[in-house]
Amino acid sequence: MVFSKKHAGKFQEKGDSSPSTSNQHTAIDPEKALESDPYEHLPESEAAIVRSQIFSPPETASFVQLFRYATLLDKALLSAAAIASIASGVMRPLMTVVWGSIAQSFTTGPAANPNEFQHSVNNKVVDLVYIGIADFVCTYVSMFIFIDRGEVLTSRIRKAYLSAILRQNIAYFDTVGSGEVISHMTADMVLIQDSISEKIALSLSGISTFIAAFVVGFVKSWKLTLIMMSIVITMLLVLPLLTRIVARYAKLTMLGYAGSGKVAEEVLSCVRTVQAFGMQERLAEEYDQHLAVTEKWGCRQGAAMALITGTVYFIMYSNYALGFWQGSRFIVSNDIGVSSIISVMTSMLLGALSLGQTTPNIRRIANGIMAAGKIFATIDRQSCIDSSSPDGASLDTISGEIDFKDIRFRYPTRPEASILHNFNLHVSAGETIALVGSSGSGKSTVVGLLQRFYLPTGGNLFLDKQDISQLNIRWLRSQISVVSQEPTLFGCSIFENIAFGLIGTSNENASVDIQRCLVEKACNEANCMSFIAKFPDGIDTLVGDRGVLLSGGQKQRIAIARAIVGNPKILILDEATSALDTESEEVVQSALDRAAKERTTIVIAHRLSTIKDADKIIVMSKGEIVEQGTHHELMALNGIYFNLVQSQQMQQSKSTEIEEKDDYQTAVDLVRTMSLVHEKEDVEGNDINDTRLYGFWKCAGWIARESCPELRVVLVGIMFASITGLSNPIQAVFFAKCVSSFEFTHINYGEMRHTVNMYSGLFFMLAVVEGIAFTMSGAYLVYASQHLVRRARLIMFRHYLRQDIAFHDCPANSPSALSSTLSTEAQQLEGLTGTTFGQIVYTSVTLAAGMILSLCIGWKLALVCIACMPILIGCGAGRVYVMTHMQATAKQAYLESADSACEAIRDVRTVAALNRENQVQEEYFDGISSQVTKNRVVSVHSAGLYALCQAMLFWILALAFWYGSTLLVKKEYSIFQFFISLMAIITGTQSAGQVFSYAPDMAKAKEAAESIMNLTAQKPVIDTWNESGIFPREVKGNIEFANVYFRYPSRPDIPILRSLSFSIKQGQFAAFVGSSGCGKSTTLGLLEQFYRLDSGQILLDGQDISAFNINKYRNLIGLVQQEPALFSGSIRYNLHLGTSEAITDEEMHDACKQANIHDFIMSLPDGYDTLCGAKGTLLSGGQKQRIAIARAILRKPRILLLDEATSALDSESEKVVQDALDKAAKGRTTIAVAHRLSTIQNADVIFVFENGRVLEYGTHQQLLANKSRYHELVKLQALENK
């Protein structure tokens, strides 16, 4: 049994929650996560079942496994690219052979025979040109293939990961969370692609250069090479140890990123709640805690890598010292000549230098391997309930008979609580049964087991006497349609959302025309067409992320249409009409009653008027059936059900008899929120894609400014990087001195030995200095880089929370898209900071110092070589431009494709229930595949420019040798002048060529900086950072809407509120009623200042609310939404989020008692420290709603807004909570939006909305006496009281 640290960390967090600081997502140090088994108290048989649902394999991967999805063609291409990379690496040591030969000619002197000397040099120069051509071809082939195959293989890993995620059982998501999954799909995939693309080509080339250098050395002088190997062997013993440390830190860094991604996705999904309660800064602090963990391990990883680099350079310069010292001794003994020494020395130099420059690439590969470990662990995880498996029987026909026999169940994430105890229930074919009972009694759990979302820990569940564990999962779910308590719609059109209900049916592949007919029929039956017909695009109207563009009632009706369009055999209605207005409810209920005929229907209901005609009503309590029978039978018992009905009975007017009336034509439903994506009119809302383009240097300047808090650290890092840059010109002087001393070997051995010994000592001194400098430079700059990345992530997160709701309404700014951007862009800033910035400083100083030195020593040769530099730099700059363009287009494409996938992951229960897994995969695969094809063209240009940069090194060297030889023949230069000029320029040129290997990273960094700059430049219309405005004092609570007109920012052609005017007096309990989409919730949103008015005023105690300070104003308001938003921390933490002020346990307990949730919380093993799960998934709908009510009460608001605050409560809890809300309303102004009229009949004033206006208002009795619209609504909702 392998218990992952991810799960261990979760349980450790739960245990560590403290009464005072129960944070939403406690940032747990991954190194300290305990590996414990929380199921040891269970019987082994039950523990095994529970474990199997959240088991995760070890998160390990190897370099070879990165290529697990390579085909034979891929392997052939990659093999050819690897050979080309190796060949490219071999070219450089071959160059040293030519170099040594030329040096031999130079030391013997051109004076003896100038013509023969020049001819010999010319031949060798031609060899260098040919080597350059070969290097160009090899580099081009290797870079293009690795970049292209990297894209292809990463796309396959993306596809495999999404497929694996979508086949996982639901309990897996209870522990992992959609935010963590999205982080893996974005940030981790970038790391994997980085590790299997050009970084491998560069690493292979560097390693082959290193090996080939030794081969050349052994050929030229095995003795000298063998002696120099002693230091290299030391390096090979030290580096693996350091590499393991780097890998360990990289893994811990990845864990931190996953945690922060989980927080971000969850918070951004609940942005309305966050803004209403002023949670921005508190949640940003929570997010920053996870970033701090990531920063800690990132800094340590960078320091370890810096130590590796410093070790490599120490060994490289030590090799110089040893080589020259021992080489001079061999010359004295006539064992080898100058040519061999130069060839061995330069080849060893290139080998060591290439190995040093390979270490950053190896770091990227190591990061990719660590990221792949998490990805492959998920891919390899065998789900205990695999929806993609073809196994299992598919019955030809089913009647719909269902049997629960001795079912026991507990949630894997809450194993201490037993949910169902020996549960037995028989549902006959075609029967309609209703499940009623208090929140948390197990009603929704029964439905989840029937859909095979979880495994029961005991007992069996049968469909037509066939154990459902033996049935094919996809077939089983295709027979079941569900309308959940909180309906989930996807970010596409109404037609597409409803047509998802056809998946798995005979009409799944029918023509579009047939499907449209079926969809329209279902819409009519679900009472949808009344509002759909008013949209400009009808059923092709986009609904926005999670249906945000529709009201709650509209969403629920579309979900009902989706459920009935496929004519399922089993229909499950989990509070299917809870969000409907009274009139729509009757029409939809009639449609559902018709739909229930000849099929098995299970109804979960708190509103008992909807289930009184059920064939059987099951009353549940604490996971057991306590009563069952028909409505009349249970009423006759005078038991629990009878009391539930009595608590919901409407008070009827005693003075007025309700009479029959003509059918009331439903008013035209209005669009509640946003419009279609393709709307071309100018809008007020901000769109993250409406960006301004910045130049490279502008972006680099922004990065520099943001690094100012670490200015001292950066300056120290630059100082050490500058010291490293001076190493090449200095070693050029030492090298030239040693080589020129060989010219007088035959004259004075003693003089030669003295000179070489002195400079060998200086080389060792240089080795110590540079070893320290490279280590300190890397450590300091990575430290600053990690702090910058952390700061940039936090800046983005805070700015996302700063933006007004209009920004978040834009489809381009969906929670999935923003989470994806947050996961990748800040990290990409490392492309212009950290080790990359250190390399830029190193190269700049090397070039500048080299050019100055060479100009001072030999200006003619220096000018010729410098003249070639613009070509080299131009090629590199061109590559940066090409890669920047590719990065911009790829980023948008991957965001769009990832958005749909992330949406599916976030709502995985609905995806599983609809069997949408294959469809989601196809949409994602199409987006990924098209981008791979587009990037291939860019890769051709990128690889060509890089190959030209590398080949230029050989051609510049050839030019330098040719021109230098002519200067020697003319006796204008000495050998010392020639070599010092050559070495200074060539080493600088080689370093410049290496810098441009970072072009993709630099391009990504520029693109990321540009994106963040655009985000920070956006100032929202309603800015919570604005400290101006009136601070409200002694607020009484008088509210007035004066001639208010409002249209959502993106749809100025669709009016929502039209001359809305009403007033609510201080301390009044006001209620808004009316059909779905009439503007009730919009009115609450305007009171919260989520949007600005088109015209008119909203007054609080006579003062326009837009004049108030937004934060102080919102502190006056408590909000309970129709779909409560909780965060995946403890119950205590969620309650503390209700107010920015400190609260005592007594105040918290009192608020929970008022909300009728205290007793339930105290019954849990961990009490108020019990974890709620991601978005509160570990709690029932009623439990979440009551915690949300308690959270609002804790604010002690002057104005209380209740948007269907009791819609998810059972009758018993509703009565208690309603009494509590009535008490809470005293002394404050309360506004309740309600469809369940029993909750607002005692309101001081009731406003009936229609077409964005108030149609009538008054008390309950007054409105009944009017016999107008409210009278109709009451009539439709009255319970049968017999």
Image (cartoon, grey):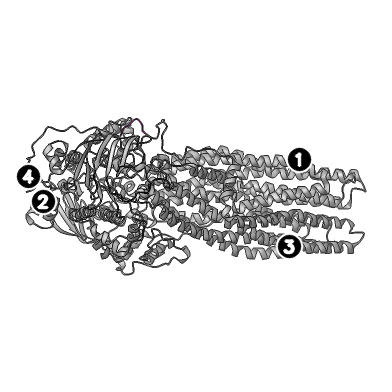
Using the image, tell me which numbered label, if any, was put on residue 654. 4
Residue assigned mark 1: 867
Question: Is residue 1271 magenta-colored?
Answer: no
Residue assigned mark 3: 318
- Rendering coords of residue 472 (x, y %): 30, 50
How packed is label 3: few (under 14 Cα within 10 Å), some, or many (20 or more)? many
Gap in angstroms between the C-alphas marked 1 and 2: 96 Å
Q: Examine the rendering and report whether any part of residue 992 can be seen.
A: yes
Q: Examine the rendering and report whether any part of residue 467 can be seen.
A: no
The range drawn in magenta is: 1051-1055
How packed is label 2: few (under 14 Cα within 10 Å), some, or many (20 or more)? some
Label 1 near label 4: C-beta < 8 Å?
Answer: no
Residue type at tag 2: Thr
Q: Earlier in the sequence, mark 4 or mark 1?
A: 4
Q: Earlier in the sequence, mark 3 or mark 2?
A: 3
Label 2 near label 1: C-beta < 8 Å?
Answer: no
Q: Quadrant of the N terminus?
A: bottom left
- Rendering coords of residue 1252 (x, y %): 26, 35
Residue assigned mark 2: 630
- Rendering coords of residue 516 (x, y %): 29, 32
Question: Is residue 1235 or residue 550 the one in the foreground?
Answer: 1235
Q: Earlier in the sequence, mark 1 or mark 3?
A: 3
Q: Earlier in the sequence, mark 1 or mark 2?
A: 2
Please tell me whether mark 1 sits on a helix, a strand or a loop: helix
Please tell me whether mark 2 sits on a helix, a strand or a loop: loop
Gap in angstroms between the C-alphas marked 1 and 3: 33 Å
The number of numbered badges drawn on the structure is 4
Gap in angstroms between the C-alphas marked 4 and 1: 102 Å
Residue 773 quadrant: bottom right
Left or right, 573 with respect to 783, comes to left
Kindly report the secondary structure that dominates the magenta region of the rendered protein. loop
Residue type at tag 1: Ala
